[in-house]
Amino acid sequence: MTKYRFLEVPPLNSNLLMLQLGRLGDFMCSTAFLPILKRQRPDISVAGIVRRRLLNVTGSCEYIDLILPYGLLYDIPLSIIKNIVYKPDIFVDLNHFVSETSKIVTFLSLADIKLTIATGHKTYPYNRFIALEGIESSHIVDRSLAVAELLGLRVSERDRRPHICIPMEGFDGANRVLNDFGFEDYIAINISAGSDDRMLSSEKWREIIKFILKESDKNIILLSMPSHMEIIEAIGFRNKRRVKSYTGGDFFTFSALISKSSLLISPDTSAIHIAGAFNVPVVGLYPDVSWNINMFGPTSDTKVVIFQKGRLVKDIETSLITKTLIQQLF
């Protein structure tokens, strides 16, 4: 069982909590305690800080910490984040950034509670760190909930979810898509992933789709980033009445479509964490890497993790996926 403790514990004498945040999936899991904090300690405001790669005018890269305000952190709005300091831009002239850096330093100086959920990065100006014992068996959501417990907040099993707040325009966008498709009940299949090693071939997806259409009466929505539209096109599904695709690239609409689905199938953990936030059943495709599954596995009540011994996600046999689907879902 994983144990947590603060390495340094200053007095709890500030109403501002700083978070170090990472990529999209890490962000949703690392902020799982925010709804609890908002309910039980509305006096504490929160700002996020993330390391971004900035490309300067000479073409070289530097890494700078940016404080990210409400509505700008990966386009996910968090009503609890109240402090607007700087809008990040990946491509900037670093000379222009000097004045903004001074704002960040000033802002950091206001926070007596500066907290990170990571185990390293000791160069960050934080005065609270969480030490994790048994990190190899610790889900990143559990680490976030440890923050709540260490702050004296009450945590229930229902709180063990990633956190994402979808604005109404996201649901409006999803409703327009569903009205156009004529769908109410559907399976969402996320084609995209953050690395090529997690990308199934169009041939494998075609087999999986054919299997679902044959074995169930479910409709299917294929989701992908705009950059992966060629995979959707290569799948070449013929039953366009029951199989539709969304490649619009709007993150809010993408998330809302997952939240409204009856099942998500995905090789990408970010989509799996979105489903977890809304307790949507998940079939997750993972590499045979135990720490990856332990840290980033699905949190939905109904979930299936598929991996094949010694293989990457892209090499998982289709027969294993369809066998798991028929055993677990139909």
Image: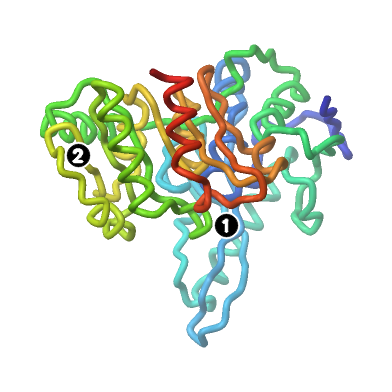
Query: Where 324 falls versus 62 (above or below)?
Result: above
To which residue does mark 2 refer? 244
Residue 288 can be seen in this image: yes
Res 279 visible: no
Q: Which image quarter is the C terminus in? A: top left
- Can you tell which quarter of the image residue 230 is in? bottom left
Q: Circles 1 and 2: CB distance less than 8 Å?
A: no
Residue 198 lies, in percent from the top left, at 50, 52
Which quadrant of the rendered structure holds the N terminus?
top right
Residue 137 place in picture, x, y as percent: 77, 34
Q: Residue at x 58, y 28 (%)?
A: 34
Percent of width and height locating residue 5: 86, 31
Q: Nearer the viewer, residue 106 or 82?
A: 82
Above or below, 103 relative to 73? below
Q: Quick one: label 1 or label 2, which is nearer the N terminus?
A: 1
The local crowd at label 2, few if under 14, some if 14 to 19, many if 20 or more residues have their Cα within 10 Å, is: many
Position in image of residue 121 (x %, y %): 77, 55
Element type at mark 1:
strand
- Three-letter amino acid code at disc 1? Leu
Q: Which residue is mark 1?
A: 66
Question: Residue shown at 23%/28% (left/top)?
Answer: 219
Give whichever of 277, 45 is nearer the camera.
Answer: 277
Dot 2 lies on which element? strand
